[in-house]
Image (tube, rainbow, N blue to C red):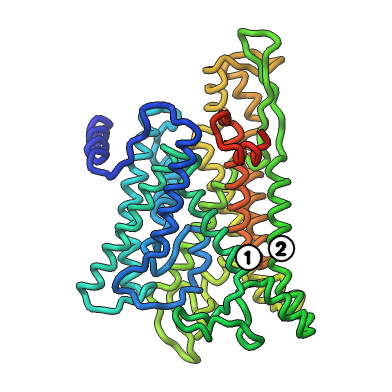
Amino acid sequence: MSEEEEKGFVSKIAKYLPTVEGPTYKQPFNSKIKWTIAALLMFLVLSSVPIFGVAKAVYDQYRFYEIVLGSKFGSLMTLGIGPIVTSGIILQLLVGSKIINWDMNDEKYRKKFQTWSKLLGIVFCVIEAAAFVFFGALTVSGGLPVTIFVVMQLIAGGIIVILLDEIVSKWGFGSGISLFIAAGVANQIFIRALSPISSTCIAGDLSTCLPSSQNPPTGLLWQFFLNLFQAKYTNMILSLIPILATIVIFLVVIYIQDMGIEIPLSFSGFRGFGRSWSLKLLYTSNIPVILAASLVATLQVIGRFGLQAGTNGMSCSLLACYDKNNQIVGGIIYYLTSPTSLLSNIISGTVTQSDLIRALTYMIFLSLAATVFSVFWVSTSSMDSASVAEQLEGIGMQIPGYRGDKKTMEGVLNRYIPYLTVIGGLLVGIFAALADFTGAIGTGTGILLTVMIIYNYYEQLSAENLEEAHPIIRSILGE
């Protein structure tokens, strides 16, 4: 297909894709806040709407997928941001490896990237919806017509998420992907830490919701006090570890987010006027770990496709084996997932050699994946040295002590950006894995993503004109 034919094909596709048109004027601050909150509320409401035709079930085996991909199994938001992220991963790999030779500094190719990303996202809505239903991730209570209707509901939910993401990115702040991940993790933290209701609670049956020593509360804080009153000190410590781990991860990530290198800049046309630009240690922020964790979560789901019953209650597929409690116990996927509460197992003396090997392989896989995605993200999002130098030259800025041309600035930036890209991706992957080993509430990766998302929102909001913002928002941002 020639470039002209491809251009015409892309234009035709773009006409028929569901799209949220962006504003034709500069959005005021309060309007952006309203659109962001409206999109978030709609996402949360749809996460509580059950899919018609799906049997009620507990989906604990998909907890990591739900956290990382903003999903809620059994609801209209079952697919979450999975289709968006999957399409993004594929395009990042194709463009970053130059299999598809698109110059992402060119506006034409950036639009093409966005069009194909949305098209692939919709395609993956169909693929993932069909896979979840026909491979048994969701149990359909009906015949073929009901099955088809369930698939259609899942596809509709996935497309709605794509549109909500567009609403946030065009009319609000940040991206819907980040916002929905943070909302899901925050919900998990609140329930897992503070809920006084029993974990076996059944709607409409109050007796099953009242906590007791045999039926402990869901909230770890309440479990801590219950164990304290019963003098079960080992259990008390084990219930406290995830809470402490969550707090520590919050503090460490906030500290790391501020680490970076200050690059002085000056205006080429006005002497004495300038500013400093901070090249963060985590140069690509949370994007690499979102993509890497999404890949892990997707592999976990794929590992359940084609399960066949075996001996001793075991079920196995080509990639993984599960016991009668739906816990993964073997296969390739086993060594690409984090061991459950490794730190607690070490403290209680129940850790096994298999747990340690699994922890090592998981850390290596997650950190390498995050590093690869970090490199590809820089090359496809105009964050490489050449693109940044061109942007600085375009606004009339230069690095003091060097010539103000693009090539010179690119040479200076090449001393930092490529190394920060690799080191930042590797560090965020390693730290995400270590955080997962602590058994932190909402998973270590979820906490890591949430803190980085909140911090990025803080920086973005601080850069806005806050004169018309609500006094509470100004006080939070220190204005």
64, 441: nearer the viewer: 441
Residue 22 lies in quadrant = top left
Residue 464 x, y percent position in the rendering:
56, 31
Residue 270 x, y percent position in the rendering:
64, 8
Circles 2 and 1: CB atoms closer than 8 Å: yes
Numbered tag placed on residue 441 in the rendering: 1
Q: How many marks?
A: 2
Residue at far front of view: 471
**Rendered residue at 40%/53% (across/down):** 42
Callout 2: few (<14), some (14-19), or many (20+) C-alpha neighbours within 10 Å?
A: many
Mark 2 — residue?
245
Quick one: SS at disc 1?
loop
Horizontally, residue 449 falls left or right of residue 301, namely: right
Residue 442 x, y percent position in the rendering:
59, 63
361, 20: nearer the viewer: 20
66, 50: nearer the viewer: 50
Numbered tag placed on residue 428 in the rendering: none
**Rendered residue at 50%/91% (across/down):** 312
Tell me which label, 2 or 1, sits earlier in the chain.
Answer: 2
Residue type of the residue flagged with mark 1: Ile
**Rendered residue at 33%/68% (across/down):** 51
Answer above or below: position of 347 versus 454: below
